[in-house]
Amino acid sequence: MYFNLSFPCLNAAVANIQLNTGELIFVLGANGTGKSSLMQRFVNQNPENVRKISAHRQTWMNNDALELTPATKLQIEMSIKNEDRQTRARYRDIYAAQRASMTVYELVNAENIRARSIAAAVDANDSEGVNEAKKIEAPIAIINELLRQSNIPIKISIHANERLMASKDGGPEYSAAELSDGERNALMIASDVLTAPPGTLLIIDEPERHLHRSIIAPLLSLLFERRSDCGFAVSTHDLDLPLELPRARTLLIRACDFQGQHAWQWEADELPADAPIDDILKRDLLGARRKVLFVEGTESSLDKPLYSLIFPMVSVIPKGSCREVENAVAGGRSAENFHWLQAFGIADGDGYDQDQIEAKRLRGVYVLPFYSVEAIYFHPEVIKKIAIRHTDAVGGDAAAIAEKAILRGIEGIALHTERLSKNIAKKALRKLIMDQIPNDDDLLDGQEVAVTNNGPHIHATKKAKLDRAVVAKDWITILTQCSVRECKALDNIVATLGLRTIAEYEKAVRHLLTVDNDALAFVRGLFGLLPADLEI
């Protein structure tokens, strides 16, 4: 399924844009370039399956309780659809208050539908139906997860008389109408997106209004991930926002020709999602918060979403390899007197000794206490907590299942210690050789290069240590010695826990860290001095 975003354009290559379900396009441009008119055009071209979140949206609620009847709701919904197609909708909203009431209605109604589904299955003694109904998350549960991941410490709930309530940091509850302007805005945007029917084109105009950009980027990213069955067109003045969501398409609006007050032709270019940007350092730092955390991996790897949850107070930027992380931190720290950023880094702990770890820390790079980031996801304590949550839903002995899962993981390692230890040794040897190469000045001075290759010894040592850990059934040591993703160990663990895929398990871990403060504190504690240093 796709949405029609065609418009009169001087550049014929972008005049007939189609946006597929599951895609996000940013519409960027300065004031006066006709962005609002263009977004209004997109609304009119997709009248049957569009939901608009306007720039001049009302961010307050007249009431935190359900005011509308189903019949009134349907009538207002039809009126809003008709109004959104009018030219005047570009600059005013005569249904602003009703939209806020609709948001409350949609949230309460979704919660009630889920409750009725579970109750019907219980009344029918259908245990399988109960479990299936419980798997469908209500929008409020998802909103609470998204708000926390976006560093907004509030929790939304529905109370007696179907009132929408809020609490902050576990404190006393109060009316959601009393939330701050930014909190209400985040709640209403998330609600409008999450309650939209599948196959909806979501038009979001200037999300930066009333929201700090450190909140916008993670919120949009998470909403986009949750609603891959919809399309997103987001208009913004923030030229840096797409850098936080690199998978998005970008439509750059340069100018617009007007006939009177009506836009009729645009000058625009579409930047591909993977368009190279010349100044890499500028790309990394634009719009970042004061503290920047460079990590290994890419935008699509495991590192960024996990570290963003663990360290929400910083901007997390993937940099590929350990060497690139170190270079980014060194570059950032060397210029601290010229900008307002503080650079930190995390490197995988694949083979560093204690002296190397301390030397890196003094340069601002903190070494993960395990071979790679997978160890955080599959730490024994995390496995136990996932087992507890899973057995709460389907039954069983969580401790026994977690123990069996870890043993099955070790079995997956036992069959591959030769291959795994070779991979470990190759990486360690490469690092060792690179460390022996003189610097440029010494090379120019004629210093001889003598490289010692003790590969067979390194391999034998690594294999012996890995074999001992397997025999001792020491999963923690295994996690420090090798990449557990390079064999069937993780598949064995996930299957034993009753989950379908590794990706599903990893998603469950990230959800765990958003709802379980003890789990988050434990994982954060695995990083030694880094959390405290980031707070300074």
Image: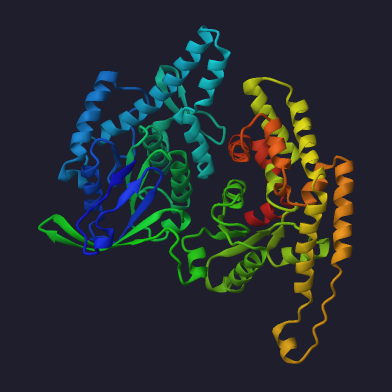
Q: Is residue 172 above or below residue 183?
A: above
- Expressed as whole percent of the image width and height from the top left, the position of residue 106 reads 36, 27
Q: Is residue 262 above or below residue 108?
A: below
Colouring convention used in this rendered image of the protein: rainbow
Q: Nearer the viewer, residue 167 or 386?
A: 386
- Expressed as whole percent of the image width and height from the top left, the position of residue 288 reads 50, 59
State left or right for residue 233 relative to residue 328. left
Q: Can the viewer see residue 62?
A: no
* Residue for point 31% across, 22% down: 67
Q: Nearer the viewer, residue 476 or 457?
A: 457
Q: Nearer the viewer, residue 37 or 496?
A: 496
Q: Quadrant of the C terminus?
A: bottom right
Q: Can the viewer see residue 436?
A: yes
Q: Residue furthest left?
A: 260
- Expressed as whole percent of the image width and height from the top left, the position of residue 20 reads 36, 46
* Residue for point 80% across, 35% down: 407
State left or right for residue 410 relative to residue 3. right
Q: Quadrant of the N terminus?
A: top left
Quarter location, residue 127:
top right
Q: Residue furthest bottom?
A: 445
* Residue for point 89% across, 64% down: 457
Quarter location, residue 331:
bottom right
State left or right for residue 158 relative to residue 480. left
Instruction: Please count the marks in the image.
Output: 0
* Residue for point 41% across, 41% down: 186
Q: Nearer the viewer, residue 429 or 344?
A: 429
- Expressed as whole percent of the image width and height from the top left, the position of residue 229 reads 41, 38
